[in-house]
């Protein structure tokens, strides 16, 4: 007889097996993806931070000595959002629908809840790796000056997860990718522009400003910038982190449901 | 290939020998309003090879997915290895192997990595998984391709790898959904031999197939499914005896230029059960030669005829 104790639906062991699998897959392609995920934020830093920044003399209202020091940390969080958002759309649908590897994993002791959780965590890990590399660039340019900057990749990972969890949950309900383009164009791109990475959202009309502040990416930008420049206070650090965690928690609960429903038809 | 390379398989099978591997009662699966599996009853005994036969869309894969714990049942009851697939799915899967109808190998990994990574999901250590992969590569006759990308394998090789992968956890119950589709005759016969070896080790096999010879070769018992229901159940020899005659007379008629067959009307009026197939007519008779004579005496002039023993295929055609 099978043991009568009910198996748990979420275990560290299951997550570890899933992530091991992803690591092995990643070994073949990591070079190209790491290089592109490093170059992407550097383009913003160079063109906007240094290029556009060279035209800006007075940065006193930004709270940083120069414009690049304002934009560089903001880009860390916004690029985390874009990377996590991208990975939560097409590659997620591919894994669920076309590749069959998720179906194969569910013929093992792995549960759908572990698969959903592992899927989101894996996106978080990839964001963490990209953010750590980009942080080293910020250190080289003398933008990351505070020891607290060492925590900034974690802030980026939380920002990524706050998008990966709900977006992956959504993708698991999709049959086709037709909504993904609009999500990019009218969802992620505006959030990127209004995230507070390039100018303070207090410059915006009130309603737009509050809308921006409600988005997790604004909190990710504020947290990353505060850590990298060493200007963050306890209240801000805890508040932004808690808000990001809330999005992650709710998104994750949805993802567990939608992945389970999708993969057990 | 050494038969003892499979020695690790089936050891656990003897332990749970008293529990029925699969028990289904009024098992039903609906997709919306569509009934894919319509209240079927069947039981698979320990160590037995049980086969689901049926035409496309009969509900075989839907049944297999419920047994594999992945697809929730709509109604009825189902126990697998003595447990409830909805509540104990993880424990059941730990002791079960699944070969799905569509290969779902990881195309980004090598042949060996597919086996090792899969074994890891069952809690097998890296070292043990690597050792195991050698045995399984031999089993699948893929040792030379161990480090090739799966993407580069032929369809039949992928199928063999999928089957080998299902054995990483020494399953007590092995589900095979059309295991030999896409295999060449040599590979099919080799697989039959391997499955027979597993059976000898006490592994219970539940398989679906379109191939009647496969069911006759492997199955101790089988059910013929049609449109979600069970049309017949029994041992292959029993089914042949109870549903069709001893012999079958096959008649062929010349084709019209437009592709239809120039068949006389009323072939079923001569006292025999007949089955009209697109290319030929089957006549069920205990004495095929005598039946042919009867037809000839009644003016039926086939362009070709043949008498043969009845097979499971005839049962299948008669029932579905
Ligand atoms: N996820 C699904 N959603 C809706 N209908 C489905 C789904 N899966 C199967 N069906 C339907 O259920 C019926 C039975 O399908 P199933 O795959 O079980 O047949 P099968 O006997 O395995 O056929 P085949 O020999 O072609 O593999 C089919 O009509 C199929 O279209
Ligand atoms: Mg099928």
Image (tube, coloured by chain):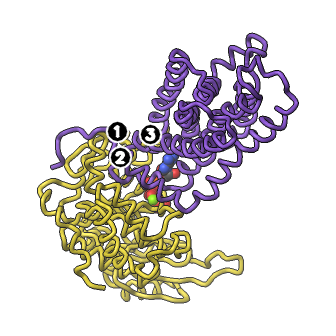
Chain colours: A purple, B yellow
Q: Residues within 10 Å of mark 3 (few under 14, many from 20)?
A: many
> Is residue A165 something one can see in this rendering?
no
Q: Name the residue nearer the viewer: B43 or A265.
A: A265
Do tags 3 and 2 sit on the same chain?
Answer: yes
Residue at the disc numbered 1: A10
* Rendering quarter of residue B258: bottom right
Contact, mark 1 vs mark 3 (Cβ under 8 Å): yes
Would you say B313 lies left or right of A37 here?
Answer: left
* Rendering quarter of residue B239: bottom left
Q: The C terminus of chain B appears in which quarter of the rendering?
A: bottom left
Q: Image point 47% across, 55% down: which residue?
A: A23
> Is residue A9 something one can see in this rendering?
yes
Q: Position of residue B230 (x, y in %)?
A: 34, 55
Q: From what the image shows, is residue B284 above or below residue A4?
A: below
What secondary structure is marked by label 2? helix
Q: Name the residue nearer the viewer: A56 or B131.
A: A56
| Mark drawn on residue A68 | none
Do tags 1 and 3 sit on the same chain?
Answer: yes
| Mark drawn on residue A14 | 2
Read off the chain for label 2.
A
Q: Name the residue nearer the viewer: A182 or B59.
A: A182
Residue at the disc numbered 3: A117
Contact, mark 1 vs mark 2 (Cβ under 8 Å): yes
Q: From what the image shows, is residue B210 above or below residue A19?
A: below
Q: From what the image shows, is residue B139 above or below residue A106?
A: below
User: Disc 3 and disc 2: Cα gap in Å?
Assistant: 10 Å
What secondary structure is marked by label 3? helix
């Amino acid at each position: 007889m099978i043991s009568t104790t009910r198996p748990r639906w979420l275990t560290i062991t299951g997550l570890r097996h899933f992530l091991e699998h992803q690591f092995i897959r990643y070994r073949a392609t990591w070079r190209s993806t790491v290089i592109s995920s490093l170059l992407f934020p550097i383009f913003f830093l160079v063109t906007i931070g240094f290029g556009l920044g060279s035209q800006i003399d007075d940065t006193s209202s930004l709270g940083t000595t120069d414009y690049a020091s304002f934009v560089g940390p903001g880009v860390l969080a916004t690029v985390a959002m874009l990377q996590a958002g991208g990975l939560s759309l097409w590659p997620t649908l591919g894994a669920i629908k076309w590749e069959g590897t998720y179906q194969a994993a569910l013929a093992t002791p792995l549960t759908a809840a572990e698969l959903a959780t592992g899927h989101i965590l894996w996106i978080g890990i990839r964001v963490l790796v990209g953010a750590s590399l980009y942080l080293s660039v910020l250190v080289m340019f003398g933008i990351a000056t505070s020891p607290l900057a060492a925590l900034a990749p974690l802030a980026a990972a939380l920002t990524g997860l706050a998008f990966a969890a709900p977006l992956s949950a959504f993708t698991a309900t999709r049959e086709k990718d037709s909504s993904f383009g609009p999500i990019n164009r009218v969802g992620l791109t505006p959030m990127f522009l209004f995230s507070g990475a390039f100018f303070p959202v207090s410059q915006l009309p009130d309603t737009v400003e509050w809308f921006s502040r409600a988005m997790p990416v604004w909190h990710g930008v504020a947290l990353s910038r505060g850590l990298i420049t060493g200007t963050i206070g306890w209240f801000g650090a805890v508040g932004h982190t808690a808000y990001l965690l809330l999005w992650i928690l709710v998104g994750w609960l949805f993802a567990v449901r939608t992945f389970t429903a999708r993969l057990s038809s | 290939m050494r038969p003892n390379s499979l020695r690790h398989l089936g050891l656990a099978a003897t332990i749970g020998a008293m529990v029925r591997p699969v028990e289904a009662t009024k098992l039903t699966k609906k997709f919306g309003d569509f009934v894919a599996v319509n209240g079927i009853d069947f039981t698979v005994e320990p160590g037995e090879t049980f086969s689901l036969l049926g035409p496309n869309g009969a509900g075989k894969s839907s049944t297999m997915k419920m047994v594999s714990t992945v697809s929730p049942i709509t109604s009825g009851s189902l126990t697998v290895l003595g447990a409830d697939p909805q509540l104990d799915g993880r424990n059941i899967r730990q002791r079960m192997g699944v070969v799905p109808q569509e290969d779902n190998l990881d195309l980004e990994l090598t042949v060996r990595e597919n086996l090792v990574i899969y074994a890891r999901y069952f809690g097998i250590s890296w070292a043990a998984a690597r050792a195991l992969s050698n045995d399984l590569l031999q089993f699948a006759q893929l040792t030379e391709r161990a480090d090739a990308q799966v993407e580069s394998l032929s369809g039949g090789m992928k199928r063999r790898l999928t089957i080998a992968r299902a054995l990483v956890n020494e399953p007590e119950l092995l589900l095979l959904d059309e295991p030999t589709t896409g295999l060449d005759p040599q590979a099919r016969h080799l697989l039959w031999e391997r499955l027979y070896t597993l059976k000898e080790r006490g592994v219970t096999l539940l398989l679906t197939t379109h191939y009647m010879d496969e069911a006759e070769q492997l199955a101790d018992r089988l059910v013929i499914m049609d449109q979600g229901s069970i049309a017949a159940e029994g041992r292959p020899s029993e089914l042949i005896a109870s549903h069709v005659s001893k012999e079958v007379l096959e008649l062929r008629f010349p084709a019209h230029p437009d592709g239809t067959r120039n068949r006389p009307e009323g072939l079923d009026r001569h006292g025999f059960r007949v089955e009209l197939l697109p290319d030929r007519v089957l006549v069920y008779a205990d004495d095929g030669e005598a039946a042919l004579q009867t037809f000839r005496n009644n003016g039926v002039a086939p362009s070709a005829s043949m008498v043969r023993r009845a097979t499971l295929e005839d049962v299948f055609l008669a029932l579905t």
